[in-house]
Image: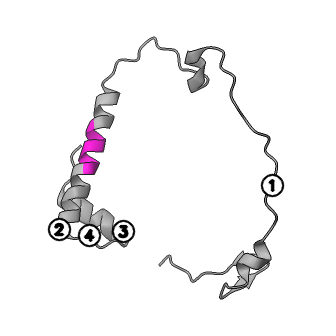
Amino acid sequence: MALTTQDIARVANLARLELRPDETERVLGQLNGFFKLVAQMEAVNTDGVEPLAHPAAILGEVALRLRDDTPNEPNQRDASQRSAPAVERGLFLVPKVIE
């Protein structure tokens, strides 16, 4: 699946991006390169290959260095929202952006 410059222009329009012609060509090359890589990966025969439960499982017993999930920053919501133009019940209010 190869994209064209018209495809890039349509995606840029949907994303509300303005791309110069040189940027369009660069993005086109990058995206087509990505799709080429995906096609190569899909071409690999994986019949009979058991999926790993975890990517580190291939290494055997690995001690993962995990830290406790404990909050260590104070709640600074009020200070962060002081400069906001509109706040309601602890939430930032923003203009509607979906048409």
Callout 3: SS = helix
The residue to which callout 2 is attached is 21
Q: Is residue 33 left or right of residue 74?
A: left
Give the residue number, with chain letter if any, for mark 3: 14
Query: Which of the two discs, 3 and 4, sits closer to the camera?
Result: 4
**Which mark identifies residue 72?**
1
Going from the N terminus, do you reach mark 2 or mark 3 first?
Answer: 3
C-alpha distance separating marks 3 and 1: 40 Å
**Which contiguous range is marked in magenta?**
30-36
Q: Tags 4 and 2 in contact by the CB under 8 Å rule?
A: yes
Q: Is residue 73 left or right of residue 27?
A: right
Disc 3 residue type? Answer: Leu
Q: Quadrant of the N terminus?
A: top left
| Magenta stretch secondary structure, dominant | helix
Q: Position of residue 13 (x, y in %)?
A: 32, 70
Q: Amino acid at mark 1?
A: Asn
Q: Are marks 1 and 2 in contact (CB under 8 Å)?
A: no
